Image (spheres, rainbow, N blue to C red):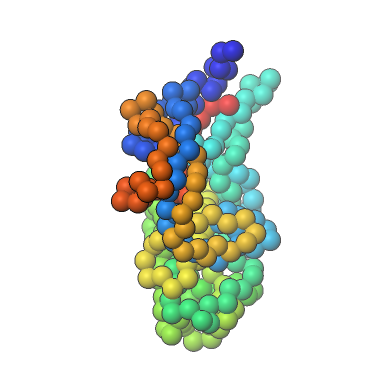
Amino acid sequence: MARPPSIARQLDRCDVCGRKIHKKNLVSTNVAFLAAEASNYALYSSYNSSFWTVDTSSDSGVISIGPYADRSRVSVDDSNTSTEILGSQTWEGAGTLRSSTGIDASAWTSLVFAADIGPYERETIPKTVFALGLCDSDGSNKEAQASFSLRGSIRAWFTINIADLPSGKDSSDLYFYINATPDTTGNQWWADRLQVEKDATKLGTFAPTSGTAVDRTDTASMTMRNVCANCREPLLSKSERYGRVAEQRTDEPITVDIQEI
């Protein structure tokens, strides 16, 4: 049976060489690998009202391509109306995304807070100013640790030693925030791939979460990877696994080229 035309036009990425290629030209194969150590104490790495809340900005839906262009789609209905779906949660106007559940970091030495951020569909004009930092449980007493003036998207982050927390911040009950201020009233922005890393001083491996924190050491594992014709190879035995290029449990997103549906 022939593949539907929409599948033939969708882009994916070879998990070995990284080259973008049509999905229909990839094959899936098992591979044993070493999953790099990672931690994420933000219970949801994408927006979820169980852990994150937003002040001031209005909800625009999951309409931004964000960091996942390979996942985002444009749907066209019978009346020829297009709708962006399966993207990153987006908000309109100036506001603050903040955690609503405290994180106990009292036994840590340091932490990293990181997120992919940007204006809606990477608008380059006007710019959006973002600030990342620590706040109280109700969003008050914000202590900015990093700021970015963006005409596009980046992975933004800051690190702080627990011993150097600002006055009034409780290491056993920490809250994090991202504040967005678009140059033009009503412009939209998004944040995704949110992460709080334990005992880190720089960005580590991203660990997605969905209701449960992740804290893992290097772990031997098995996964499925999609490869192009140039990178196809037989399944390696465990004795051949180490010494090869490290692979992540989670594929890095394709950040350009929105797909069809």
Residue at position x 59%, y 39% from top? 86
**For the C terminus, which image quadrant?**
top right
Residue situated furthest top in the rendering? 1
Question: Of 68 and 221, which appears nearest the observer?
Answer: 221
Q: Is residue 215 visible?
A: yes
Horizontal placement of 21 versus 216: left or right?
Answer: left
The answer to whether 197 is drawn above or below residue 188 in the figure is below
**For the N terminus, which image quadrant?**
top right
The answer to whether 100 is drawn above or below residue 252 in the figure is below
User: Horizontal and vertical percent for residue 126?
Assistant: 42, 48
Residue at position x 50%, y 63% from top? 216
Horizontal placement of 167 versus 232: left or right?
Answer: right
Q: Is residue 180 visible?
A: no
User: Horizontal and vertical percent for residue 77?
Assistant: 67, 24
User: Horizontal and vertical percent for residue 220?
Assistant: 46, 54
Question: Of 183 and 248, which appears nearest the observer?
Answer: 248
Question: Of 144 and 107, which appears nearest the observer?
Answer: 107
Report the label total: 0
The answer to whether 157 is drawn above or below residue 124 in the figure is below
The answer to whether 74 is drawn above or below residue 102 in the figure is above
Residue at position x 47%, y 71% from top? 198
Q: Quadrant of residue 135?
A: bottom right
Horizontal placement of 244 versus 99: left or right?
Answer: left
Residue at position x 56%, y 33% from top? 73
User: Horizontal and vertical percent for residue 28?
Assistant: 48, 32
